[in-house]
Image: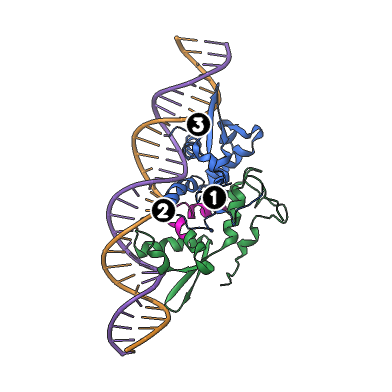
Chain colours: A blue, B green, C orange, D purple
Amino acid sequence: MSKQVSPIVDLAGTDQAGQACCAPLVCEPLNAAEAEELAPLFKAIADPVRLRLLSLIACHEGGEACVCDLTGAFEVTGPTISHHLKVLRQAGLIDCERRGTWVYYWVNPGVLARLSAILGPRVTAMT
Amino acid sequence: MSKQVSPIVDLAGTDQAGQACCAPLVCEPLNAAEAEELAPLFKAIADPVRLRLLSLIACHEGGEACVCDLTGAFEVTGPTISHHLKVLRQAGLIDCERRGTWVYYWVNPGVLARLSAILGPRVTAMT
DNA sequence: CACTTGTTTCGACATACTTCTAAGTTGACA
DNA sequence: TGTCAACTTAGAAGTATGTCGAAACAAGTG
């Protein structure tokens, strides 16, 4: 499951072919395969710590944050933060890179947009 | 069927007071309280069966579905479906009503819209 | 090289979750 | 009233998750 830029990203929300892959779940029934694929993504953000981590990273200046910027904002230990970052990374929601002593994380906006589109009440047809 | 809007609904996505409650998490950092409140909602949809249940209910004609319409679509037993429906209901994502022999479920669209807005890349300022 | 700081991995523990079978409840109908 | 069908609740088993402390790994500095 090599992270890097994952292929999931191009399913951002604008369904270029009108495929069911991005239609809001209120528009047409999710099939089993789609549900099996989406559930782990929602599971990744279904934790208060991970939700805040995601938000902190996304809002941090430059769009990226080093682990040391994040650890201080929580009451949990470093290893726990590291574990949660790993979960988010394995889901494809964030990516990271080591630069010298520090490891920087940034959000993969396409995946987030896809989840938003799935839950969206209607296709936001704004070009 | 008129779907009895619950109080949560007015947090739909258009933040009437510019409150942090509805700003996308990529815009400003989620605080601990908000994260604690949102995580259970995401957890409720972080399961393939519940994701499909939600979708099946939302897409069913009339916007509502009886349990017997849902059970057949899954490989799990009736009690398991009932359990998942309860989880969705307790999260506020769906509501139900007994009418005679059958119990009908419908989606609370406001809650879904709120989650979508939280994940959304930017406030969709379309009036 | 040794030492310090930043970050991840490992192993363990308690808690929570998914699913099942069995039994209970509610309402329709003969 | 008795019986059947639709659902829900209760209890149990197996698995997954969140958290920690200890230890390992990585990179800079003296």
Q: Residue B56's spot in the image, x, y percent? A: 47, 61
Residue A3 lies, with reference to residue B117, above or below; the image says above
Q: Nearer the viewer, mark 3 or mark 1?
A: 1
Q: Residue A84's spot in the image, x, y percent? A: 49, 39
Residue at the extreme front of the image, as rendered: A17
Name the chain letter of the residue that bears numbered label 3: A
Q: Quadrant of residue D28?
A: top right
Q: Please give the range of residues in magenta.
A: B37-53
Task: Give the residue displayed 52% in from the left and 52% down from the top.
Answer: B42
Left or right for C15, reference A46? left
Magenta: main secondary structure: helix
Name the chain letter of the residue that bears numbered label 1: A
- Work out whether mark 2 precedes mark 1 in sequence or the reverse, and give the earlier one: 1
Crowdedness near tag 2: few (<14), some (14–19) or many (≥20) residues, C-alpha within 10 Å: some
Which amino acid, by three-letter code, is at mark 3? Gln
**Which residue position is annotated with label 2?**
A32
Which amino acid, by three-letter code, is at mark 1? Gly
- Work out whether mark 3 precedes mark 2 in sequence or the reverse, and give the earlier one: 3
Q: Residue A55's spot in the image, x, y percent? A: 60, 42
Crowdedness near tag 1: few (<14), some (14–19) or many (≥20) residues, C-alpha within 10 Å: few
Task: Give the residue displayed 43% in from the left and 74% down from the top.
Answer: B102
**Which residue position is annotated with label 1?**
A18
Which amino acid, by three-letter code, is at mark 2? Ala
Name the chain letter of the residue that bears numbered label 2: A
Is disc 1 on the same chain as disc 2?
Answer: yes
- Work out whether mark 3 precedes mark 1 in sequence or the reverse, and give the earlier one: 3
**Which residue position is annotated with label 3?**
A4
Q: Nearer the viewer, mark 2 or mark 1?
A: 1
**Spatial distance from mark 3 to mark 1, Cα to Cα?**
27 Å
Task: Give the residue displayed 40% in from the left and 62% down from the top.
Answer: B81
Q: Quadrant of the N terminus of chain A?
A: top left
**Spatial distance from mark 2 to mark 1, Cα to Cα?**
19 Å
